[in-house]
Amino acid sequence: MSIYQHGDLPEHRTLSRRQLLRKCGMGMGALALANILTQVGLGSSAFGGSDLINPLAPKSPQFPGKAKRVIHLFMNGGPSQVDTFDPKPMLDKHAGKALPMDYLPTERKTGVGMASPFKFKKHGKSGTEVSDLFPHVAESIDDICVIRSMHADVPSHEPSLLLMNCGEARMIRPSMGSWLTYGLGSENQNLPGFVVLCPGGYPIQESQNWQSGFLPGTYQGTYVDTQHTELTKLIENVKSPSSTTKEQRRQLDLLMELNRKHEQQRGGSDTALESRIQSFELAFRMQMDAADAFDISREPKHIRQMYGEGVQARQMIIARRLIERGVRFVQVWHGAGQPWDNHDDLEVNHRRLAQESDQPIGALLKDLKQRGMLEDTLVIWGGEFGRTPTVEMPTPGANSGKINGRDHNHYGFTMWMAGGGVKGGYVHGATDDFGFKAAKDPVHVHDLHATILHLMGFDHEKFTYRHAGRDFRLTDVEGNVVKQLLA
Amino acid sequence: MHAREYCALAFLMVALFLMQPVIAADSGEEFFETKVRPVFVERCYSCHSADAKKLKGALRVDSREALLKGGESETPAIAPGKPDESQLIKAVRYEEEALRMPPKQKLKAEEIAALEAWVKLGAPMPKAQVASAGAATKPHGMTIEEGKKFWSLIAPKDARPPEVKQAAWARNDVDRFVLAKLEEKKIAPSAPADRRTLIRRATFDLIGLPPTVGEIEAFEKDPSAVAYEKVIDRLLASPQYGERWGRYWLDVARYADTKGYVFQEERRFGFSYTYRDWVVRSLNDDLPYDQFLIHQIAADRLELKEDKRPLAALGFLTVGRRFLNAQPDIIDDQIDVICRGTMGLTVACARCHDHKYDPIPTADYYSLYGVLASSREPDKLPLIGDAPIGAEKAEFEKELTARKAVIDEYEVKRQAEINASLIERKTVVKSLIAGQSLLAADDSKAKSIGEKYELHPWVVQRWRDYLKQSGLGPRAFFSVWGPYDALLARKLGAKSPVNLTRAEAQLLFNGDDGNKVRELKEKVDALVATHPGSPPRAMAMEDLPAPVEPVVFVRGNAGNPGKQVPRQFLAVLSAEKREPFKQGSGRMELAKKIASKENPLTARVMVNRVWQRHFGAGLVRTPSDFGTRGEKPTHPELLDWLALRFENEDGWSLKKLHKRMMLSATYQQASVDANPVARQVDPENRLLWRMNARRLDFEAMRDSLLATSGQLDSKIGGRSIDIFAQPFSNRRTLYAFIDRQNLPGTFRMFDFASPDSHSPQRFATSVPQQALYMMNSPFVIEQAKKLAARAAMGKEEEPAKGIAKLYRSVLGRGPTKDELDLGSKFVQVEMAQSPDAVALNSSAWQYGYGEFDEATQRVKAFQKLPHFTGSNWQGGAALPDAKLGWVLLSAGGGHVGNDEKHAVIRRWVAPRDCSVAINGKLSHTSKDGNGVRARLITSREGLLGSWIVYRKEAATDVKRIAVKTGDTVDFMVDCGRDGDYNSDQFDWSVTVTKEAAVEPVAGDDTGGSWSSQSEFSGPAPKPAMPMNAWEKYAQVLLESNEFMFVD
């Protein structure tokens, strides 16, 4: 018999643990149920065996975390800190002159100091300075914790992207989203637990940025090209090319009956059989829920107006709708390739990129807040590194030789976090006088990861996975929780 | 000393300090206890003491001996009496960037002073601390001597199969080992599986496909005592055996068809497929397993005859990820695939430090590293066969020549341009001066001189050489300048600095040239990699002319070389005195050490892998970790017994090994869970009291779908193909193109082996995306349709007959009475469905006509309009329609019908319960006629508004009404009571907006609006792949658990 009556369309709501119990309880042996909802033990190779029943069942962290879910806004290419959140009056004074410091080696040759073409202003009660590139984001500055002393290891995109995403620059390791989905499962069984939005194609390093590494493939980020608006292009196999929902329901009812008989003949206690039976019911609901989650026309007009027009607005609304439905980790990339990588024409390009994303990001923060979700949703903003305060010199074949852009810079850059238990209206650390290198309270990417895991309820040293004879961590053998960032 | 040695967390550990015995023997020690130890305890102990949560840099500061020994850099941390030479003091002074301790915050000045004074005193420290210092020097793993006693590292023991009580149950010696354990626990083994189950199990196990109905029936009827053995022999002889077990080996070998992430080079491996095909062929030929391994590690060192195809075996080493060509990472991956893949040893753990648990020192890792670093992939991969003859070959060669010619052309053109620029009068003058300057300086100045004169340093050197050789010396300027003319180049001769060869000119290529040439070369590589006429090559390896003498990379950092180590085998698997490898790189010697009866791991690991595939779990449940962190075998004597049979009696024959396992009664048990006692005692079935039921993996599932639908293409080998591209390939899944960088989601969701590193076993997750694939993927639907067609099911098919046919095709059996009833009911219901019901994408809007019922104040006799022109709904192709007259609806409005009975109606159907507001604008613009009458009517509340407009506009707003799913809201327009329908065209666009709470709340998704204008549409599209009743039924059977699981 069927769990659903014909035409009983599922309501668009998060399927909580309790609901799952209630909904799936019918016809399901107690043993099977226990297995499906068993908390996966952390710190040991829970998946060493071959039966992994429901990998996305919600699980508890090691201790109660302030943040329950994450939206990671990835400004790929590397936004310039001195043009956005790290004002440097000294740089203005030395504009056009060699900076009085030892130049640190970056990817390419750079020249004199390049003043920021953007104006900074204090915002909010905290008085944190933000450049005029981000007026909408600045409105939420009292909810934002700006880290001005980030640093990474090398000035190249590929290793830096992997470091930021997976905590390791070269070898195959699971991404942060995969780790968290592995550790926490997902609150919504009808959607993937880890979703990656990027319009127009992949960033460089491609899907390795959201790889599951040695964790089961189901923890890999599900990539969605937000340039498309058609649902079938967003999610694979989400719609039947043959049947209406009602027809499909009739097929599934028959399938359920056949499978039940098959199961009973085999003792009725096999969790693998049972979970495959349930997976069809979940899939049936997923068709509706996915359609619903990605359909932003269902947002009221005033909300859509708040986010504005364009693909960035669309993907921020989608991000919020996904998070709202219980997806654990949503990563939102600015675009294919490396849009923020402005070796040339920095002023024009940074202005354009900020114009595309400022209002949508500002709206996202306000929208989460007005829904009461910001307090347990961690929003992270930043690139894989920042940019030099000095101007990039011409290199044939590498830039267009205009001498009006900035090179990569991993020695010091800015990221910010909001919500999810971070200290709002706070500025952490500082770069040197010119914004080249993290000088005060440096925060390495490993430290950032340790802090994010802490916010989610994990001790980064104890959150491990046994693979190839070793217990692996997101932070490898490094990382310290930056306590000052915590609210 | 390394910075990490002092890495400290700022935990205060005063309490800990207070618990330490304080035995100050003299004033020096007292000074230590009062001034120095508190600093150590508070600022250093958390990382550098016996009690450190985690010892950093292997350095401890809680004993004098430990300080004198130093940490992993093996330099003393203190030089007693000499603070300035002590690394510890340098570190706390923050003298060097790389060595600042404690890393978070520098010590206070007085604390540093105390440490300095203490070292100057000779660093006295109480003896009491010495006792625990021993622990610091002991490696935390296992010593080599201890390792040689570990179960997996000692030779297998040939135990006699144990005596059992139920000797009759045992069919071979395997069973005695299993039964003895069961009897010990008083568990009875399960009944034997029936023949249909058994042949299905055996067939999937050996060839990854279901048995045909004919095969099942033949086996069920075969009275022979060796009927089952005949089945196994047939399957082992099938070429599909190699395809199934080859794929298992490819999991071990982390096979893929791409290099992973690349920067501007061809991403595909052109010839990974030749490795895959070699594996399949070798397994089909039952190449002895020791030879199988030797080929894969060192085929280039074998004396091959005419047939060079065995060289392709080296793909085992070369089909891994390329890590942007970073050699240490490539070799790390190779060490991992060799050691975990063949011996179940996690040697790669020893890359940065000695293995923490197993007896594998870092030095051993770098001994193997040296072997692989002494090997390379040849620039030109060796040909191992002929290209397919014919048009494809000719086409390939022609295209290859053409693409290479483009590179030649570009390089020659640039050569000419570069030479022309070098001979410009201005450049020659600068070059002379620069060359002259370099004559007086050494080579290292070439760069700075070049920069000064804006010349490439190579050009400066070339002129310097020219000036020197020609002996012109300081007079050069004049001697060359004098005869300078257009013939200068010739005059200066072949070695002229202004007449560069093509190769020389390339040295002066700029970034743009580099990009261009790379781009052109990529096109050549792409052709070689993908063209069907490109002849097969082996992804081979060869030895370097001179092998590399490896050094340990301290902390795994290639930039931090440590002591030199010989190229040799692992200490724990070698005799006391190890012989370093002598032949070339040492790969062949390494291969022979692995593929040897002397090696206690190799046979055990492979036997366990085969067992795992036959029984669903290995005797050792960590199949690639036979070290101390792995699991111990459930049946150690059986594992040893099988390993010894495998490498001795059976001569490393895998086919004989399969047979040994499959002929056992253990293997032939039923999988039904019908023994509550056994379940209680051994819920995981570790003792094998029944067979484990298994779900098909992705390959077996897809291949079975193709086999069942009759589409399976049995061609063996060749280039990989995209299995997701339409029209779908019917090749076996083994031949799917594996892009390790962006592995298609379908592979991932079905737990395909990660192609990124050696994969010991597959996960078996259950996620809804798997079900979505079965329900909605065009591939599965195509198979369902083909299956129905194959069973020749017509529309008139009698249900009982059709169902029986499908059951036999899909499940290899007939339906039960219940199943027959269920099926008949389903098929009948589906056949009764009108084709209309199949329409997808149901819109909220409908377009029709009808009449207003004054009595009920509702719409009467709503009929859908029959014809859509592409922009309008109307009565027929031409207007006025014979029956429906002028009735018309367009996106923005329409035209009324000829009388009150033919009012046009635009209908909105509520898709869910909600309250909505309706806004509209109605207008009639024609000067003629007398206007139209509009009504807004809901099925729930009746008439809500009525407007008559003539040459004017009206707002048709309704504030807020509640609707239930399926309620209709009709926008009806007619000609009015007078019946005059002249010039009664109108515009009426409406928006139905769902009302949302003003303050949004979490989980609220009730926004949404429906616009009559923008959502105006023609008939709902027909489904892309419509299915009839039988096809739908066939799909259900393909989705069933019975199809997906093997009992």
Image (tube, coloured by chain):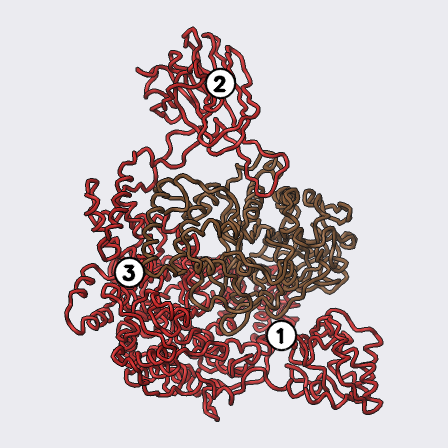
Residue B1040: give x, y in percent of width and height.
32, 53
Query: Could you tell me residue B814's position as x and y percent?
Result: 22, 54
Residue for badge 3: B393
Asked if disc 3 and disc 1 are in contact, CB closer than 8 Å, the reply is no
The subunit letter for the residue under badge 3 reads B
Q: Is B660 in front, or is B40? A: B660
What's the distance in space between the residues labelled 3 and 1, CA to CA? 51 Å
Q: Choose between A348 and B342: the one closer to the eye.
A: B342
Q: Which residue is under mark 1?
A: B443
**On the rendered image, what quadrant is the N terminus of chain B found in?**
bottom right
Q: Is residue A446 left or right of residue B214?
A: right
Element under disc 2: strand
Among all residues in the image, which is located at the extreme bottom?
A: B577
Query: Tag 1's secondary structure?
Result: helix
Q: Which residue is mark 2?
A: B943
Asked which quadrant contains residue B901, the reply is top left
For marks 2 and 3, give the CA distance.
77 Å
Chain B drawn colour: red
